[in-house]
Amino acid sequence: MKKISIINKLLVTCGLLLNINFSQADTCSGKFFNPITDVCWSCMFPIYVAPLPTKIGYQGQKGSIAPEKSSIQAAVGSKVFPSGICMCPSHLIPLGLLMSYQEPRRMVDVTKDPFCLVGLGGISLGGLEDVLPSPGYGEEATHGMQTKSTFYQTHWYIAPLLAILELFDDVACTQGEVADIDLAFLSEVDPAWNDDDLSFLISPEEVLFSSLPAQLACTVDCVATSLPYTPPGGKVGKLSLDTSMDYFMITPHADKITNTGSSLNPSRYLFWCGGCQGSLYPLNGNNIDAHHEIQTSVLSAEKTNMLIHRMGLETTTTGALGMCANLIPDMFMDKSEWKYQMTYPVPQPLNPSSSMGSCCNAFGETDTSWNSGASFPITGENFSYFWFHERDCCML
């Protein structure tokens, strides 16, 4: 495993310039995740490996694969990718086979305490609060006691776990990924994170989705992401094998409507909704209609994901444009390509309440099946989540 060097250099440099006191403050709680026990590895499913016309699933994991992408299907129709064969001119060996899986590659903190790096073990950049005063957790009743709004700070990490563990390196599926954990975004230094007027500048379309019909549509999103999914095809233990795809991938393949990765699922088209967590707008730390800590922390994590895309800090990793080189900015998030799990305070794979279902969640899926005991006073009020993103690649 390679050393996590970039983030260390960044913190040391900031500390020297600003005389920051790096400490594990009493209010800053956190933990660095264990890549073996704390990561929901089943979240990497569904998996597709050409030339076999089989979609491999596990315990009803939701998500899409390369042959279900319209850009891949269009290329297949023109015989560019017969039988799952792909071509990447930039590769040393241009011909390869299509492969698709859900990659663990991003991490996000959701914290009540400004400059508290939850995912890095609860390190507090305490000195920065004097230089960059930032609001902490806030809770406010609106319209009497009917609704409540909350506010969290978030931090977005680039964490390509497979590249760090040196997995899939030989098949060129983690190409271009630096095997380090890097801090890409601090909400405390974003002036729009606690200002609705400023956040409107980066997401002016929010005026279109503040109406009652647009908000009611999020109820549909909640149901569509939370319905149980039973993969088609036969089963081998907990694995599911969908062999209904055309071997030459000429006939477009569509999955069940209960799969968030399916083109039939309405969730992927309701991009302004965060499913059961609420509306993704305004695109900042202010969460309207908050109900409990898990729900609002997940909503903050989802908002951060969408904001990172809007800033152009994420790249396309799916379809014909993403399978060869991850260089094209992806500024419009596709919710169906993302799944997440909690890693702190209670890693979801170790949470007893998750034993009845999956330790991985689709974007917008209800948290009622696993939120019991997932937060608690004092050391369990800050959160860390790991994000899985679909990757289509042309493996050698």
Image: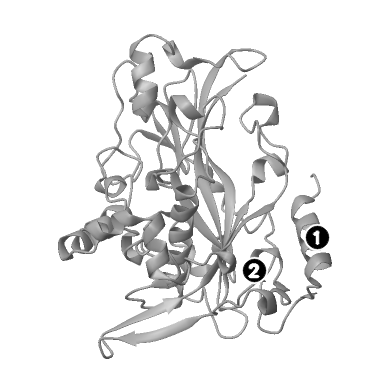
* SS at circle 2: helix
Name the side, left or right, on which 145 lies relative to 309.
Answer: left
* Few, some or many residues within 10 Å of mark 1 (<14, 14–19, 20+): few
Marking on residue 63: none
Which amino acid is tagged 1? Thr
N-term mark: 2 or 1:
1
* Few, some or many residues within 10 Å of mark 2 (<14, 14–19, 20+): many
- Look at 64% across and 12% down and name the residue there: 93
Q: Residue 306's x, y, as percent?
A: 43, 53
- Look at 46% across and 33% down and name the residue there: 318
Name the side, left or right, on which 248 lies relative to 218.
Answer: right
Q: Is residue 360 visible?
A: no
* SS at circle 1: helix
Which is nearer the eye, 89 or 172?
A: 89
- In the depicted structure, whether residue 76 falls above or below residue 310: above
- In the depicted structure, whether residue 266 falls above or below residue 353: above
Which is nearer the eye, 120 or 41?
A: 120
**Where is the N terminus found, in terms of image quarters?**
top right
The mark closer to the camera, 2 or 1, is 1
Q: Residue 283's x, y, as percent?
A: 40, 62
* Residue at which label 2 appears: 118
Which amino acid is tagged 2? Val
The reply to whether dot 2 and dot 1 touch (C-beta < 8 Å) is no
Which is nearer the eye, 61 or 217?
A: 217
Q: Residue furthest left?
A: 213
- Look at 41% across and 63% down and name the residue there: 199
* Residue at which label 1 appears: 13
